[in-house]
Amino acid sequence: MGKTVLVVLFSLQSIFASSVSLEKILESANKNGSLTQAISQENLSREAGNKAENASHPLELYGSISQADPMVGNRAKEYSVGISKNLILDDILQQESEINHLINQAIFSEDEKTVLDFNNGLKDLYHQHCIDKNIYQSVNRSYESFLKLYRKKQQAYRYQEISKVELIRLEVEKESLYAQLKEVHRKQEISRENLLRVGHLAHNQMMLCTDIYPIRSETLPNGDHFAYTKDAYQKRMKSLQKKVQRYDNSFESIELSMQYDKEMDMDRYSVGVSIPLNFTSQRSEQKRLEALYQSSALQQRHEHTMMQKQNDLSTLQSELKNRVILIESLRLNLKKYQNHLLPLMDKSYNIGESSVIDYLLTQERYHQLQQEYYANQKSYYHTLFKLYTHIEKKDQ
């Protein structure tokens, strides 16, 4: 009775619970998740810091007061007050702002890869759950079919058509199938709960599972690969080129000042200018060399990264193709079992041509093939979304 209740309860849960698609899960996870929000806030923070760093220098107010005690005459207070302003020449502030903005955009592109990795991980979880769901349905069908056979054999035992030993062997197999049914149901529920938690969805929702990606050997999407890596590299390279230009200046800034002095017997007004002579220091030249060396190092590192990515891509593609071949082979074997061998063995066993051991061994081999088939499907999807993350594509 308890075994029947388990199946009925799960069936009712599937009927009355709403089904959610992969697209809705991704939408909810990105809308309500903390990762995308954190990346957005960090980008805004960097841009605000860039504006603050390259804002014009404030006016400086300075002053002094003193007590004068002359040898002849009355004592008096003397004071001075003035303002100064550091002015950046040419478009240096704009160049600095563009350099920092490009670096921030490169960081943002790298953060987008993190979001892509998260989304593909979520897609993988979805597909793993849907396969768990298929496994449960397959095991449930096997259990229901075997249960019908067991009940017939119970009746046969009552009429002494089979031995007690044969009935016990069938009962052991029935209990084993039921234990397997509970186990796959538990795994399915765990994978579903993980999806709902990561996707910020209601606990009673079920997965649609009609939108899973097809299994195919040609899995490499068209278009440009490694887009985020290339974009980040181009922006960093461009920022270094601008940095070289930025330090190719003899004069960077001047400081203007105006001052009023109140002395005992006069008022004094003065205007001053201070010009740093950069050509008397190697600072700008060394900064320029630093940018040139960084540019060369970045180019060489990027070439190494792209070569490694291409090698890893070939490995992932080969693994996927091999997995597809194995899945197809297992599918054909399962089809032979389902259409020919299992019905033949059922008939042979029912008319007494085959022993219960032969029957159970055939069933066991069929279940092993099923497990291999679904395990390879899981590996296929895990590798597929690893490939999508690797080539930095948002979708198929």
Image (cartoon, rainbow, N blue to C red):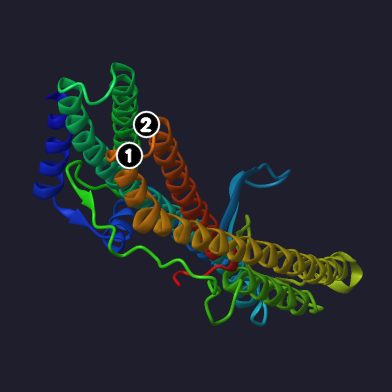
Q: Nearer the viewer, residue 375 or 233?
A: 375
Residue 36 visible at all: no
Q: CA distance from mark 2 to mark 1?
A: 7 Å
State which quadrant residue 185 falls in.
Answer: top left
Numbered disc 1: secondary structure: helix
Residue of label 2: 356
Q: Residue at x 71, y 78 (%)?
A: 242
Residue located at (21% from left, 49% from top): 206
* Residue 165, above or below 363: above
**Which amino acid lies under the numbered mark 2 shown in the image of this protein?**
Val
Q: Which secondary structure, mark 2?
A: helix
Residue at left 30%, top 34%?
181
Can you say whether 119 is above or below 231 in the image? above
Q: Which residue is mark 1?
A: 349
Circle 2 crowding by C-alpha within 10 Å: few under 14, some 14–19, many from 20: some
Estimate the x, y position of residue 135 in percent, counting from the top left.
Answer: 34, 46
Label 2 with label 1: CB-CB less than 8 Å: yes
Horizontal arrangement in the rendering, residue 4 relative to residue 382 (left or right): left
